[in-house]
Amino acid sequence: MIYAVSDTHLGMGNGRDNCTSRTALEALFTEARSQDALFIMVGDILETWQYPACGVLEYNKTLLERFLQYSGTRLILGNHDSHLVGHPFFDHPQCHSHFDAWQGGQWFRFNHGHEWDDVNNSPRPGIAQVLTILAGMAEDAGWLMRLSRWWHNLKVSPRGSYRAGQIREHIIDETTGHIVCGHTHEAGSWGEYHNTGCWVDGRTDYLIIDDANGGVSHHSY
């Protein structure tokens, strides 16, 4: 069995920390571990676009170390925590740029999904990151709160079946089978493309892949 979650956007516990609930996330991890399931965090685990990268890692280090103490945990970085690629903490055998798993007679590839998003896949700061930083500054100043919401709605496009087709075009090896992503914050399944959703805005989305037949089901904690 596989539990997959993404886009937790863990911050530093203040007003800019958008993670819905650390307590619920830890409870979900405990549930996965009790089932001897893989527990895969599919990117944007930490929020480094609105926090100093090393600061947010230090704040959440104890939690991530607890996760990594379980051999079934896999961590994948996304565009919001890509600043930490190459950091010694993530130089760990359970941390990956992507991860492949055989489950229920089928292959599943786990990528965050920003790799196929031209707005967010550059290693250099692009318009997405710049606008996110500006939105954070607006929030801190207590004005233009709608800017943050407008940018959130914009950056998660395109959606649904279009995103599924866009990603499918980039899967060179057709034997890969299914692909599981986060990034768009839109939970659901479209053919062989599955999205884990997010843990912001009061949501606690995750998916489970059954070990008997590879069936994918979506849940909220």
Image: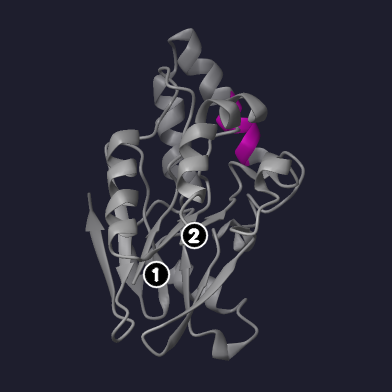
Residue stretch in magenta: 128-133
Q: Secondary structure at mark 1?
A: strand
Determine whether, in the image, residue 78 is placed left or right of residue 36: right
Give the percent coordinates (x, y) of residue 172.
65, 84
Label 1 near label 2: C-beta < 8 Å? no
Q: Disc 2 marks which residue? A: 71
Q: Amino acid at mark 2?
A: Ser
Query: Which of these two is toward me, 13 or 121?
Result: 13
- Residue 71: give x, y in percent of width and height: 49, 60
Q: Which residue is mark 1?
A: 194
* Residue 195 in picture, x, y percent from top left: 40, 63
Left or right placement of residue 24 versus residue 137 in this view: left
- The magenta stretch spans residue 173: no
Above or below, 39 against 50 in this view is below
Say if 128 sits above or below 194 in the image. Answer: above
Magenta run includes residue 131: yes
Q: Amino acid at mark 1?
A: His
Q: What element does badge 2 sit on?
A: loop
**Between marks 2 and 1, how big is the CA–CA gap?**
24 Å
